[in-house]
Image (cartoon, rainbow, N blue to C red):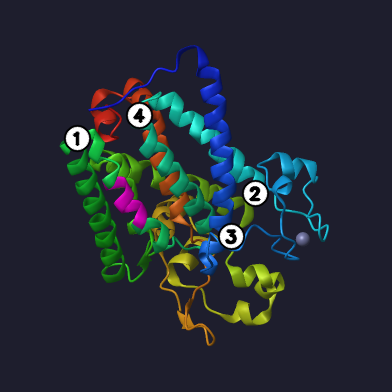
Amino acid sequence: MTFTYAPGWAEPLFILFLFFLGLCFGSFLNVVIARVPEGLSIVRPGSRCPKCGHVLSWYENIPVLSWLGLRGKCRGCGMPISPRYVLVELLTGLLFLACLKRFDWAYPLVPALVLVCLLVPLTFIDLEHWILPLSLTVPGIVAGIVLAIPLGQDAVVNAVVGASVGFLTFRFMEYVGWKVFKKEALGGGDKFLVALLGAFLGWQSLLGILFFSSFQGAVVGVVMLALTGRAGPRGEEEKVDPSKASSEEEAEEPPSTMTWEFTKPGLPWWKRVALVIPCLLFQDIPDVTLDEETGEEQWEPEATNIPFGPWLALAGLEIMLLGPWLSRVFPVEVAMMLGGTQ
Ligand SMILES: [Zn+2]
């Protein structure tokens, strides 16, 4: 059962409203991105400048417009406000419109918007901190299953099977990585994100998500590795002290075998190409040290490591938003594998 509502003559107003709603949710997602990794409340206190603590008044808190009005600077201390805030707001607004284009004013629009509001913060948190917080992924899995209820029994079964199969597949890959390659395969949070995507998009989408995410992640990872010497963003330690990489201590550390093989000069190109995928998928076993103050695990990404979360999120959005289009451009067998026939 699906519910559809045709707004008729007022449709432009509804579309504008949905875009504005997306900007407002994006504004809230900025708070989630900044505070969840720090373990802070997302409700209190109100928005403030992360540099000087200046409390934002209502007119400094309007999505996009305030940033433009303030010319990207805090009114308290004059320090620049990261353009990421505007980027997240605009991205969320545009993704809301893309969901409307895909699902029209029907019930499936609701879970689609909720999924966007989960994937946007998870992507930006993973890019910055290399983590996918369980406080976002686990409630997200539950939400995906609950939101399938109005769509009927089949949809709920697809969601539960999708979450379980997604989780177990990645758990299995982790296990194989440890046992066979003696590498940490994928980050520990990835299996929860795959479960989340499986819950929202059904088990039919999983193969396509795996294919799209690893293909795009590998291609961009290799290009970035060639251009910048890194397949993913830097870790927090390296960001604090950029001179550390060139210090002698660092140079003495023997590189791990697989990373070494990949970067070794004079390697035939076909061997380099063959090593790309295992290098990106199976990350080196980290020398985990515990932080003395917090007792948390410390881990620094190596040059060949890639945060998989953003690629999974992108693949999920592609499958969800481009589903019918994929089934037109691909032969029907491929489209079925990619979960694009709906
Ligand atoms: Zn400030």
Q: Within 8 Å: ligand 1 and the Cβ of disc 3?
A: no
Q: Amino acid at mark 2?
A: Tyr
Tell me the SS state at disc 2. helix
Q: Position of residue 272 (x, y in %)?
A: 46, 54
Query: Which badge, 3 or 2, comes first in the chain's sequence?
Result: 3
Report ligand 1 position as a quadrant: bottom right
Front-lying residue, 339 or 229? 339
Tell me the SS state at disc 4. helix
Task: Report if residue 55 lies within the magenta region.
Answer: no
Would residue 248 be found to the left or right of residue 164 on screen?
right
Q: Position of residue 155 (x, y in %)?
A: 21, 37
Q: Within 8 Å: ligand 1 and the Cβ of disc 2?
A: no
Query: Which badge, 2 or 1, comes first in the chain's sequence?
Result: 2
Q: Is residue 94 above or below residue 69?
A: above
**Residue tagged 3:** 34
Task: Give the extent of the magenta segment.
Answer: 139-145
Q: Is residue 216 visible?
A: no
Query: Which badge, 3 or 4, comes first in the chain's sequence?
Result: 3
Marks 2 and 1, Cα distance to the nearest angstrom?
Answer: 38 Å
Q: Position of residue 225 (x, y in %)?
A: 56, 54
Q: Is residue 8 above or below residue 341?
A: above
Quadrant holding the N terminus: top left
Query: Which badge, 1 or 4, comes first in the chain's sequence?
Result: 1
Categorize mark 4 by other alpha carbons within 10 Å: few (<14), some (14-19), many (20+). some
Q: Which mark is residue 217?
A: none
Categorize mark 1 by other alpha carbons within 10 Å: few (<14), some (14-19), many (20+). few
Q: Amino acid at mark 3?
A: Ala
**Residue tagged 4:** 323
Marks 3 and 2, Cα distance to the nearest angstrom?
Answer: 10 Å
